[in-house]
Image: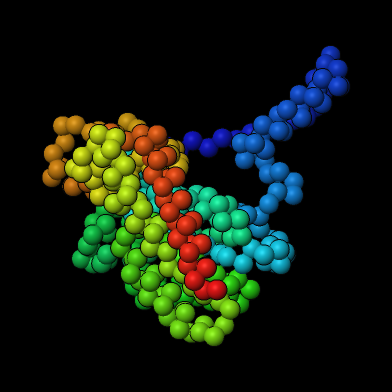
Amino acid sequence: MRTRVSITLNPELPSGMPARSWTRRWLCVLTVLTVLGIMPAHGQSSAGVPIEDMTWTEVRDALKSGKTTVIIPVGGTEQSGPHMALGKHNVRVKLLAERIATSLGNALVAPVVAYVPEGQVFPPTQHMRFAGTVTIPDEAFKAVIDGAARSFRQHGFTDVVLIGDHGGYQSLLEKVASRLNRDWAGSTARAHFIGAYYEAAQGPYSRVLRDHGLNDAQIGTHAGAADTSLMLATDPGLVRRDELKSSGRDAAAAKALGVSGEPGLSSAALGQLGVDLIVSRTTSAIRQAVALRH
């Protein structure tokens, strides 16, 4: 199970301790908590900050300061084998979107879209054959993305970026962006479908893993070494390490559990290579797309 850390701050002066020493110790504690991200630094930059963590006046001021790009990260709630939590895509795309926004320097991050098309409800198809997966119709999905994008444009964002952590809806995101741009023709706003985000996690990342000794069967296409490594690098608490089994399970048995590849060969180090690759390529693609608009 994922562990949650609860910290109780009790700045009461212990008996017999000099006030100056206690104050110095508390300053050290607060500094460490701030560095770890447990406590925010006062007046910190809004670059890369999720909009859901901001007040409306902070968003207004961020726009005035030039942060006119918003990233809409799309995840998905689906099975990822017995070793990864159903929210894998949502957690991963949020963290990577924040890194991308920070790299851009002028972007904020919208709340993650967590419900996406995952197959037919009845009879169940694709990931809907596994408990916990949530699916919605294509038209409902496109309507949510469209409405969110138009909301951000109304508030003053001029570049609305769509990125998705799941392969099944990439073409839908592209269609939404195309429709928005037709409607926004002649205005200062533009929607950008950035396929480079998902593409980087496929061929380019697979080549990196092959360079580190893994073959395609081990890398896999879902919940294998690649997918699991990315999760270990972004939020290892969502990985059940006691379920990581890389040997003795044939392809048919793995498929029955929703796995393609060998997750037991995954590591946070391999995942970090993928994270850096995705962030770098996506940041470059967004900059190029925005430059073309001008």
| The image quarter in which residue 276 lies | top left
In the image, residue 143 sits, relative to residue 118, either above or below, namely: below
Q: Nearer the viewer, residue 208 or 271?
A: 208
In the picture provided, is 243 more to the left or to the right than 217?
right
Quadrant of the rendering where the C terminus is positioned = bottom right
Residue sitting at x 38%, y 71%: 174
Q: Nearer the viewer, residue 77 or 152?
A: 152
In the image, residue 241 sits, relative to residue 79, either above or below, namely: above
In the picture provided, is 220 more to the left or to the right than 171?
left
Percent position of residue 292, x then y: 49, 71
Residue sitting at x 38%, y 63%: 195
Percent position of residue 127, x then y: 27, 57
In the image, residue 226 sits, relative to residue 152, either above or below, namely: above
Residue 52 appears in the rendering: no
Marker count (numbered): 0
In the picture provided, is 184 more to the left or to the right than 204?
right
Residue 248 appears in the rendering: yes
Q: How is the image coloured?
A: rainbow
**Residue furthest right in the image:** 19
Residue sitting at x 66%, y 55%: 46
In the image, residue 279 sits, relative to residue 83, either above or below, namely: below
Residue sitting at x 39%, y 59%: 196
